Image (tube, rainbow, N blue to C red):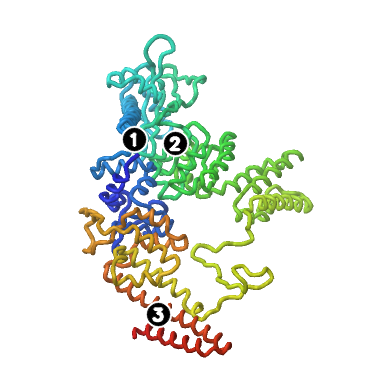
Amino acid sequence: MISTKTIEAIRDRVEIVAVISESVKLARKGRSFVGLCPFHQEKTPSFNVNADKGFFYCFGCKEKGNVFDFLMKVEGLTFPEAARRLADRAGIEIEETATDAERREADAARRAVDDLYAVNQLAAHWFERQLREHASARTAWDELRRRGLASSSGDPLEDVPPNVKDALQAFRIGYAPPTWDGLTHFLAQQGISPVTATKVGLIAPRKTGAGHYDWFRHRLLFAILDVQGRVIGFSGRILPDPETGDVDKQSPKYINSPESPIYQKGHSLFGLYQARQSIRKHDEAILVEGNFDVVSLHARGIDNVVAPLGTAFTALQAKLLRRYAPVVTLLFDGDLAGKKATREARETCRAGGLVAKVAVLSGAKDPDDFVRERGPEALTQAVRAARGILEHLIEDTLDETFVRGDAHERAARVHEAVKLIASEDDPTVRAMAQTYADGIAQRIGLPDAASFRLLKDTVTRALAEASREGAPRGQGSAAPREGQEAQNVVHPSGSGGPKNSPPITDISPWRARSRDQREEIGLSILGCFLDFPDLIDDPGCEEAIRELEGDAALAVAILSSSTSASAPPVPSSPAFPPTSPQKAGQKIGLDVLEILAHVPAAIHTFAAQRLASPRHEHREEARVELVSNAQKLKRLGLSRQKAQVVEALHRIERTGDPAAEDALLREMDRRAREKHGL
């Protein structure tokens, strides 16, 4: 494991603004930097980066984190990968918290994995060169021409639109020659161990005799990249025989690399590395079935497209895609296999936290055929017209063939549609049961009112049962939302009071006048401390800490334990010069996320926003506001105490105790003098 000392050194020495500005255009605004959020689509910048705190926060989508989180979210890295990337950037030597033996073992394992990436990289270069130079590659170019990805005559890349050239390069399209050992000999010349090449499935040992043979032969090759752009495998499409022009019908259409330590087909998505930025920009991904669908759409400017890798769409792939966008539009082929894949994808998307929609292409064409015949605008329109997957599946179940079925088939289809609706766990969708029932009846043209009512009753009953089964216990008592407090009541006897006794609301004058005001002032004081944490140690601000109560007091206590006036300043860069001079104490010793993890939930959003976008640019301004608000809190506290004394005085008057009454009057006088500073 990477040591805490190394992590702290990275956090202190790496400038978060410089890292984020490589992906997001940032502009200075006060003590923060703002830009368009990379995690959702927006027109007005709401993404804030605070260099002092090493923290980012989006006021729109609520994404937040430190420099490690940014790399993990944007590039799909693990924490150790992000830490090593940043350490290399800052010239920091990684310190491991392991024994020498464990460190040597880890280094050896890391080198072995790096060797696998390296041999795949070499193979990708070789395949690309074979596409340009090998005589038999003409069949590969013919396939690319057929799909509009190469020039029809002469140089295959002559007069090809820039988008097409970019796509061929981005997807590292190559060619595996028909010879049995071309790649095997090349790797041997490069000093690559056949054991390493075998581990990633580039070559395989011969079944008889010594030596190895190439896994891919006479195929058009697509490189499979991980989210960091490293080659983890290949996918090869069958091509016609270069001599006869015949296609071997016994061979599979596609052959993918076998699974290896760096490639598991159910964990990766074809085209995600190339599409990741566009997916973030559109806040939506398009999922297609085939490699050529992905490349063809990218080549025509529709570049938020990915595909599974020779397998059904898996929950792990859905979760991977969810890192980049919350919505996926399924654009599968219109054949039976495509319809089956769409149905299966519903549960997969739900498991991965994706909102799924379905786009339908007229003529049951695949996306590659459709975009070549109708153009990218027509395909974009089809994607825009996509419907929710539940609505699509119901429409598909009760399509125009419904009326041609016999009674048993119709009943089975109606039952299937009812099950689809009832299986929806979203309460809002369940509430639309009546609308769905009406839509079903209109769609299938039920001939009489009795049948119509029967269908609606069936749907409604199914939904009611699903609601009862899925409802959480205690649903009848709604909890207050974040930032909304439950009403404070005082019961006549103890904390609960008798069941039949109505609660008596505490309507003390001080509570009616100042409760919300005290909370508002308390948050203002907390905000000043978040802007300049070293104010916690300022003697002039001690009174403010004493007067705080509730969530704000707890948050200041957490902040107090993490302040570090000696933390090194964030280095400046030519692109982002330092702000105007500030006094020490803007830095926080602990990771900001560690602090937020302990801040009460009711004020969590306030604290995150204030840490990312401080309101005060100068320390003295924050101090003046803080001291002023402390005085306000003190006066409100004295008013509260006075109200309590007045209530007590009324009770004493009713009992007739002159000594107690005199003592209370003297206490009132003392507090009045204290309130006015006398």
Q: Disc 3 designates what residue?
A: 635
* Element on which disc 1 rests: helix
Count of marks placed on residues: 3
Which amino acid lies under the numbered mark 1 shown in the image of this protein? Gln
* Element on which disc 2 rests: loop
* Element on which disc 3 rests: helix
Q: Disc 2 designates what residue?
A: 268
Which amino acid lies under the numbered mark 2 shown in the image of this protein? Ser
Residue 644: percent from left, percent from top: 50, 81
Which quarter of the picture shows residue 46? bottom left
Among numbered discs 1 and 2, the one appearing first in the sequence: 1
Distance from label 1 to label 2 (Cα)?
20 Å
Q: Which mark is residue 37?
A: none
In the rendered view, would you say 672 is above or below 622?
A: below
Which amino acid lies under the numbered mark 3 shown in the image of this protein? Arg
Can residue 324 be seen from the camera position used here?
Answer: yes
- Please state which of residues 562 and 572 is positioned toward the viewer in this rendering: 562
Looking at the rendering, in which quadrant would you find the C terminus?
A: bottom left
Count neighbours of disc 1 (C-alpha within 10 A) and say few if under 14, some if 14 to 19, many if 20 or more: few
Distance from label 3 to label 2 (Cα)?
62 Å
Which quarter of the picture shows residue 393? top right
Question: Residue extending furthest top?
Answer: 209
Among numbered discs 1 and 3, the one appearing first in the sequence: 1
Among numbered discs 3 and 2, the one appearing first in the sequence: 2
Q: Disc 1 designates what residue?
A: 169
Residue 55: percent from left, percent from top: 34, 55
The residue under the point 43% across, 72% down is 520
- Please state which of residues 641 and 326 is positioned toward the viewer in this rendering: 641
The residue under the point 43% across, 69% down is 549
